Image (tube, rainbow, N blue to C red):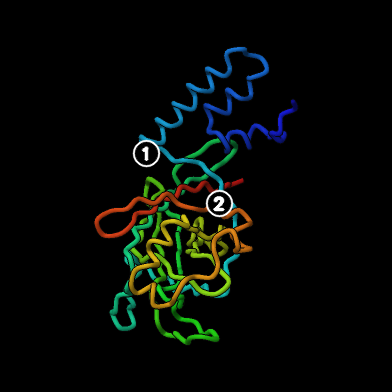
Amino acid sequence: MESSMPNLSRRELLLLFGSAAAETLLGCGRDPSAAEKLRRASTLDATALAAGLPACVVRPEQTEGPYFVDEKLNRSDIRIDPSDNGTKAGVPLRLEFHVSHVTAGSCAALSGAMVDIWHCDALGVYSDVRDAGFDTRGRKFLRGYQLTNGRGAAEFLTIYPGWYEGRAVHIHFKIRIDPAASRAREFTSQLYFDESITEQVHKQAPYNSKGRRTTANDADFIFRRGGKQLIPTLTKDSQGYTAKFDIGIQIS
């Protein structure tokens, strides 16, 4: 039987499997003990990740959407609306990005990158925009950015998103490399959520006042363009959820 694995370059293998595992794969045809070496390399990669080293997982870009506003709100708790100091109701979500940069098969934490996020509230409403169903111009809830630290980490406190017609539950994010430059390089995409967790959250107030959502992940045409690679790891805690998301940005 022929292998269904596409022909991948050395760089693509490095990105897909990590350096140790990829180097072993590249030597499989020459070394009969390659399978054992691959197992050991995978264990080493897992150990490195557990030690807090960057995980170079290159993710797909997705559309910015119509509701991006470059507010430049430097804050980690984006639940608060600075226009009236109100706090958006919803299940707390602590979101942790871990950003690394990928160059010529190497990987390192990316510090000083600007991670911007924005999303709708529990009832499907965005701030500071006018839409057919709402006008929230001047409001600033659920928007903000953080700069990555020396470990490539940026953390936010927000709420689990609600839903609106035609879209799966999601959070938009934009990463700007060298944000002080006149033309900073940007990576824009979206985060999605496990369907079973969304079902549990949306049974609670205030989400349940909107009724049952109409678009699951697989029914969202944007999700179908790589969304399975954009689902963060969620863990439940005493207050809500923590989501962790590793992303590698390719820099030529």
Q: Which of 16/112 is in front? A: 16
Residue 186 visible to the viewer: no
The residue lying at 52 percent from left, 53 percent from top is 230
Q: Position of residue 9 (x, y in %)?
A: 68, 34
Q: Is residue 108 above or below residue 60?
A: above
Q: Is residue 227 above or below residue 39?
A: below
Q: Position of residue 234 (x, y in %)?
A: 39, 51
Quadrant of res 52: top left
What element does badge 1 sit on?
A: loop
Q: Which of 50/90 is in front? A: 90
What element does badge 2 sit on?
A: helix
Q: Which of 179/34 is in front? A: 34
Residue farthest to the right? 2
Residue carrying label 2: 228
Q: Is residue 93 above or below residue 110?
A: below
Quarter of the picture containing the C terminus is top right
Quadrant of res 13: top right
Q: Earlier in the sequence, mark 1 or mark 2?
A: 1
Q: Position of residue 211 (x, y in %)?
A: 44, 75
Residue carrying label 1: 52
Find residue 26 and name its label: none
Quarter of the picture containing the N terminus is top right
Q: Amino acid at mark 1?
A: Gly
